[in-house]
Image (cartoon, grey):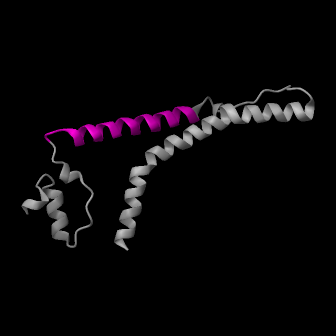
Amino acid sequence: MTQDLSKLDTWFNRKWRPAMAWSYMIICLFDFIVAPVLWSLFMAMYKGNVTEAWSPLTLQGAGLFHLSMGAILGVTAWSRGQEKMTLSSPHINRQSYARTPSRSTDEENYEERQYPSINREDR
């Protein structure tokens, strides 16, 4: 049961940033390209001409949606950059940041938290 949860956690931790970016891109494409074209076609077919313009849904409420998504994506991109810089630093032991299967005893978990920079092969 623990292995299944760790696989889900690992997948979610790796994929949530790209999923947020893709969903934001899809929302923007729909709200600024697809919906206005469909709206214009609908108006032209049923009313004969386009009398009303499409009002983007995400710009209602003073564009707070775009501000919040920009903040979320900006902060996550910045934090991911910090993670990559930390992992690429020659002074950091990369093995301490590697994902490992859960330990079998609490003593090993405690030791890992106390001394994360010690190589696992040295123990």
In the rendered image, the vertical position of residue 30 relative to residue 1, given as above or below:
above
Which range is magenta? 65-91
In the rendered image, the vertical position of residue 85 relative to residue 104, given as above or below:
above
Q: Position of residue 80 (x, y in %)?
A: 34, 40
Q: Position of residue 60 (x, y in %)?
A: 66, 32
**Left or right: residue 44 compared with residue 88:** right
Nearest the viewer among 75 and 80 is 80
**Left or right: residue 113 compared with residue 51:** left
Residue at the (10%, 55%) spot, across then down: 118
Residue at the (28%, 40%) spot, across then down: 84
**Quadrant, the C terminus:** bottom left
**Left or right: residue 31 compared with residue 41:** left
Count of all numbered marks drawn on residues in the image:
0
In the rendered image, the vertical position of residue 22 relative to residue 101, given as above or below:
above
- Would residue 21 be seen by someone viewing this image from the given angle? yes
Q: Position of residue 96 (x, y in %)?
A: 19, 53
Residue 100, image quadrant: bottom left
Nearest the viewer among 90 and 110 is 90
**Quadrant, the N terminus:** bottom left
Question: From this viewpoint, which residue is outermost toward the left?
Answer: 122
- Is 99 included in the stretch rendered in magenta? no
Q: Position of residue 34 (x, y in %)?
A: 70, 35
**Left or right: residue 38 compared with residue 73:** right
Residue at the (27%, 65%) spot, across then down: 101
| Magenta segment, prevailing SS (helix, strand or loop) | helix
In the rendered image, the vertical position of residue 14 relative to residue 82, given as above or below:
below
- Would residue 60 be seen by someone viewing this image from the given angle? no
Nearest the viewer among 103 and 68 is 103
Residue 55, image quadrant: top right
Residue at the (16%, 67%) spot, across then down: 108
